[in-house]
Image: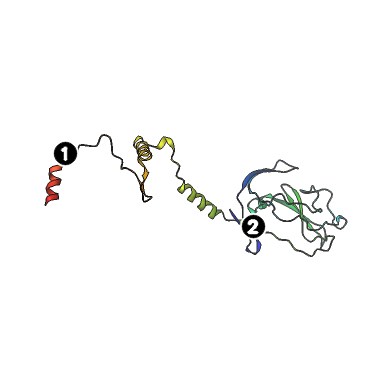
Amino acid sequence: MQVGGINQSVSSVNQSTQVSVKSRYNQYNQNIKCLVLSNITENLPINPMDMSTISVPKNIKLADPDFHRPGPIDLLIGAELFLPLMCIGQIHVAPGRPHFQKTQLGWIVGGNINASGNKPRALCHFTRSDQELHDQVSKLFALEDTKIVADKVTPEERQCEIHFSQTIKRDVHGRFVARLPFKCTPPDLGNSQQGALNRFRS
């Protein structure tokens, strides 16, 4: 499957899997079909965050308690599942500080966050999977599949296959030659020889 990203970058993905996502705080769980890549993006956040400047409300349970430490991204969730994950509940401590949003998986953090280090680099990500192209190619492979199911082969078709394998040969010019198959008990054609000869002579 072709996966497109920002600036029209395209990657080919040839592996998928089914994963189960469960909340650590409640009964929420969901099965997701995922594309498998070696890397989704670089470690996030890009720089470590100074937790002394972030006032995390004490009564909330974070979906990622180590959100302030750079780490690998395990799963990129699409909008069709991400939006239903959102719950009613948002906390904005102060201007210039991050927002806290409640989700089925716990509270998440986002927004303007001061980070230590001196890497002035923005990181954004967008993906789309070309499902329509994937479906069309799958149908093409299904049409091109020449496997014949054994129980669907008629006795006559089986006899033709045996006849072909026994009579096929290659002539001196490299062409393949096979005898035409005839039924062992052809229908009665009647007395047609004399009429055919008369037409031939005329």
- Pick out the residue farthest to the right: 52
Left or right of 104 in this view: 182: left
Q: Residues within 10 Å of mark 2 (few under 14, many from 20)?
A: some
- As drawn, 182 above or below 76: above
What is the spatial separation of the Cα atoms under label 1 and label 2, in whole angstroms?
Answer: 73 Å
Residue at numbered disc 1 = 190
Residue depth check, mark 1 versus mark 2: number of the one nearer the observer: 1
* Residue sitting at x 54%, y 52%: 134
> Which one is in front, 157 or 54?
157
Residue 123 screen position, x and y as percent: 73, 61
- Pick out the residue farthest to the front: 172
Q: What colouring method underlies this structural image?
A: rainbow
Element marked by disc 2: loop
Residue 32 screen position, x and y as percent: 64, 46
Which quadrant of the structure image shows residue 119? bottom right
Residue 49 screen position, x and y as percent: 83, 57
Element marked by disc 1: loop
Residue type at numbered disc 1 = Gly
Which quadrant of the structure image shows residue 92? bottom right
Q: Residues within 10 Å of mark 1 (few under 14, many from 20)?
A: few
- Closer to the chain start, of discs 1 and 2, is 2
Residue 118 screen position, x and y as percent: 83, 63
Labelled disc at residue 127: 2
- As drawn, 81 above or below 117: above
Task: For the residues labelled 1 and 2, say whether their Cβ atoms are less than 8 Å apart.
Answer: no
> Which one is in front, 29 or 182?
182
Labelled disc at residue 157: none
Left or right of 189 in this view: 99: right
* Residue sitting at x 19%, y 39%: 189
- As drawn, 22 above or below 70: above
